[in-house]
Amino acid sequence: MKKVIALLLSILLAFSCAACAGGNISDQSSGSSDTPATETPAQTSGENQTEPPAESAAWPQKNMTLVITFKAGGAMDVNCRLLAQYWSKYLGVPINLENHDGSNGQVGMTYVHESNVDDMIVMCSAQTYLSSTILAQNATYGIDDFTILNFTEIDPSCIVCLNDKWDSFEALNQDVLANPGKYRFGVNAGGGAAVVAALLIDHYGWDVKTVNYSGGNDLHTAVLAKEVDFACGQMEAAISYADYYNVLCTCGDERNALFPDTPLLSELLGDEAPFMGTFRFIAVKREFAEKYPEYYQLLCDSLEKVYSDPEYLAALKASNLEEFMSWKGPEYSAELNMQIHELTTQYLDAMMAVN
C-alpha cells in the first residue's frame, strides 16, 4: 500500500514542476523530438550508404473522434474540449468530440471497446471507474483492453459542504455523531470518492444517508440545492465553487495551499489511508495500438506537445488546473493504471458499501 500511495503522490509533485517549468517530464516522455532528422552525406561505398530518414506519419482520416465517457458539461467534458483545441493543432486534423455517458463510464468504454479499430477512435475516461466497472458491473472489457497514452489529470477526493454549514471537519464529525440519521451524504458512485466516504463512515461510525450521483455536475448541483448536507467530490470542483464551499478534508501528501487549515485524509485515518480521487486518462483500444503503431505514436507525440504549449499552460493556470494536469507518457501511465486497479480491487467492498 505504501508503494501505491507513494507512486500516486509523486505525480502531484510532478504536476507543479511540469507546469511551472512550462515543459514536460522528460524521463516519462514517449521519446518524440521536435528536432528534424539530418541526412548523413552519402558514403563512397554503396553498402555503407545511409538511408534517407522516414517521413513522419500523418493522421489518415479527415478528423479524429474523441469519445468522452461522461456527460457534457462536466469537468471531464470541459477539460477535453479545452485539450482538443490544442491537440488538433499538433495532430493536424480537427477533433470531433462525442459524449457516450452512463453507468459510471461503462457505456462509453463499451462503445469504444466494441468499435472497429479502423475507425481510429480515441477515448477519454477515468479510473477508478474503469476498474470498478470491470470488478463490479460485469463489463465486457478487461483492464488490458485499453492502451493509455497519458493520465491527463489526477483530481484528489475531498469532503465539502456549503459555507453556511460546518467550518471544519471536527465540527462536522461532532454534529453527525450527535444527530444519527439526520444528515444526507452525497457521493459519486463507483469512484474513489465512494471509498473515502465509506472509510470515514466506518472509522467514525457515522449514521448518515448516502445519496449516490453519476457525475460531478449532479453531485455539486445537489450540494448547492441543499439536497444533501455534505459530499465527497473532487478538488477541481471544490476550487471552482470556492465562493460557496468549505473544504473539510482532502486527499494528498500535504495540505493544499488554498486550504491550509483543512486536514488530510491520512491525518484523520492514519498513514495507510489510500490516496483516492478521479484519475482521467486518454486511451485507445489495445488492438489499435498494435495494428497501427505509427498512428498510436503520432497520437502520443502530438499530445505530449500540447503540454509544452504556452497558451495551453496559461489556460490551465487561469482555470486553477495546472497542479492537476501534465504529460506523464504511456509507460508511466500503464504502471499507474495497474496500481490503481490493484487499489480499487482492495477497496472494492468499501466502494460498494455506499452504492
Image: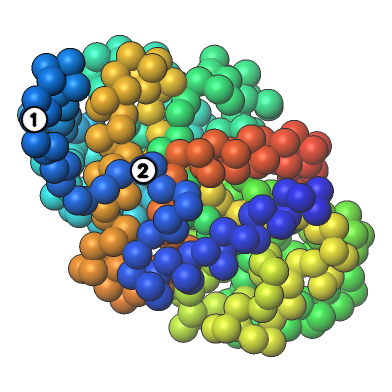
User: Which image quadrant is residue 40 in?
Assistant: top left
Residue occupied by mark 2: 31
Q: Position of residue 190 (x, y in %)?
A: 63, 40
Instruction: Tell me the quadrant of the picture where the C terminus can be found.
Output: top right
Identify which amino acid the numbered label 1 is placed on.
Answer: Ala
Identify residue type, mark 2: Gly
Closer to the camera in the image, 270 or 6? 6
96 vs 231: above or below? above
Indicate whether 96 appears above or below 3: above
* Percent coordinates x, y for residue 341 in the rendering: 66, 35
- Badge 1 or badge 2: first in the primary sequence: 2
Of circles 1 and 2, the one toward us is 1
Q: Is residue 309 left or right of residue 248?
A: left
> What is the crowding at mark 2: few (fewer than 14 residues within 10 Å), some, or many (at least 20)?
few
Mark carried by residue 141: none
Q: Residue at x 90, y 74 (%)?
A: 178
Lateral position of residue 36 relative to residue 277, left or right: left
One can see residue 193 in this view: no
Q: Quadrant of residue 293?
A: top left
**Image coords of residue 23 (percent x, y):** 35, 65
Mark 1 and mark 2: Cα distance apart in space: 27 Å
Q: Is residue 65 above or below residue 214?
A: above
Q: Please, is residue 121 above or below residue 308 in the view? A: above
Residue underneath mark 1:
42
Left or right of residue 25, residue 89 in this image: left
